[in-house]
Image: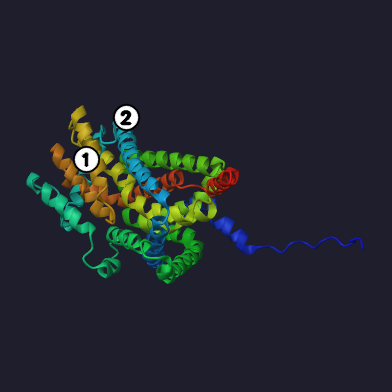
Amino acid sequence: MAVTEAAGPLAFDWRLAARRILRSPATTIAMIGAGILCGLYYPAFAHAISPVAQLYLNFLKMVVLPYLVSSVIFSIMSMVQDPNSVRYLGRVGMAVLVVSFLSVLVSGTYSLVLQPGQIENPQSRIELGEFINSQGSVSNDLAFPYQPPPNEGSDTGRSILLDLVPNNVFSALASGQTIQVLLFCLLFGLAMGKIPQPSSMSLSQALNAVYRACTVLTNWFIWGLPFATFILIADQTASTGTKPLTLMGGYLLVMGLSCLTFIAGAFGVIAIRSRRSYWATIKTCQPLLMVAITTRSTVASLPWVINLLSERLRFSLVVVELLVPLQAALLRTGPALLYTSGVLFIAQLYGRPLAIPDLLLVGITSALLALTTGGMGSLLILSQMSIVCGYLKIPFEAAFALFVAVDAAVDTFMTLSSVCTVAASTAMIAPSHRETTQSVEAASEQLEAEPAR
């Protein structure tokens, strides 16, 4: 029988429409702009609604550790049984060297070309001094040795090594010591991989269930990201105002350009590896950028990195789950940018000329110091800049107030650059679903072509 009636109109999918609107780059830009205006003109309202955003951030962060524990242990167990997994670790080491070098090179080049610390306007220098004097007590609020004696270097290195190993893994989980938890997961996953599969099957299934449940939770939480972004930007603008941003405009320009360079490069790598257009890659990564801006936490962004690479871009799930947490601890792009550009800014501010050996010292020290910042808060990361300044004999305590005033903006730049670098490096190393399928087909064809013995 011929069909005579035309098919009725399709039902409107409001969830799909809402998802497209909330994940649109235009929505993110609009929310950031609205947050800035709200903080400038309605500061009382911005402060009043700030607990809502903090509650949302707590929801985001509560799934991070179970997500990491389940994904890392499960991935290590799977990769121990794969003899080809060792090659990924060598590539991670190469990525650390390349990223550290590029971080120092990019931020150092922008700092030397733009000279953000050379303030020629006398009025601007007066305002800068007044602001530093008004914030003079802030550097005393942190119990950190801004000018450590040279003989404490060995104690500092020993303390860093001791802090890597947890004496109580449950205490490390409760206090959120990400590096210690990651080390435990790596060792525990290696041990579980040596146990026969029948004995470890129940734990493997439980970890997989925890991982998938955390993935569902992160997909739920993404609906509130634009609104949380608006509230956080409004609260930060109401707290700091625009004067610190104006005084530190040159330095923020250097950090912003450095961050933008790494984001653009990361998108290019992901686009090439996933065989997508550049604009399609930007749209695909847009929820990840929103999470990084909202949380200002590399660790809190890791579930979205894993979901982006494995679910949406179709890279190998087992490899992605291993590499993302590991590289988040090792690829410290943001702190390397901060230390290099920050030290050069202070040297320019005080008129301290730097020769080529001094620049090499800044680059090497910044790259090495950035590797020790895993799990640290933004202020503690910032305060470690005093170590590099101490080697150059330039003051840090007075300029510290300036960096604290723009910490929210700088921390956002650091998080964005670190998260995008981790995503791009993982995309470069991990095999895609297409490559895995091709390798399996090639292996099967080779077996079929071999003559029977």
Q: Is residue 297 visible?
A: no
Seen in the image, is 219 located left or right of residue 75?
right
Q: Which residue type carries mark 1?
A: Thr
Cα–Cα gap, marks 2 and 1: 21 Å
Q: Quadrant of residue 101?
A: top left
2 or 1: tag closer to the N-terminus: 2
Residue designated by label 2: 113
Residue drawn at (46%, 66%) of the image: 208
Q: Is residue 440 visible?
A: yes
Q: Position of residue 360 (x, y in %)?
A: 22, 32
Closest to the observer, 253 or 37: 253
Residue found at the far top of this picture: 356
Residue designated by label 1: 365
Q: Position of residue 369 (x, y in %)?
A: 23, 45
Closest to the observer, 131 or 438: 438
Whether 279 is drawn above or below 292: the answer is above
Seen in the image, is 186 located left or right of residue 385?
right
Q: Which residue type carries mark 2?
A: Val
In front: mark 2 or mark 1? Answer: 1
Q: Residues within 10 Å of mark 2 (few under 14, many from 20)?
A: few
Quadrant holding the N terminus: bottom right
Whether 388 is drawn above or below 114: the answer is below
Q: Position of residue 428 (x, y in %)?
A: 45, 43
Q: Residues within 10 Å of mark 1 (few under 14, many from 20)?
A: some
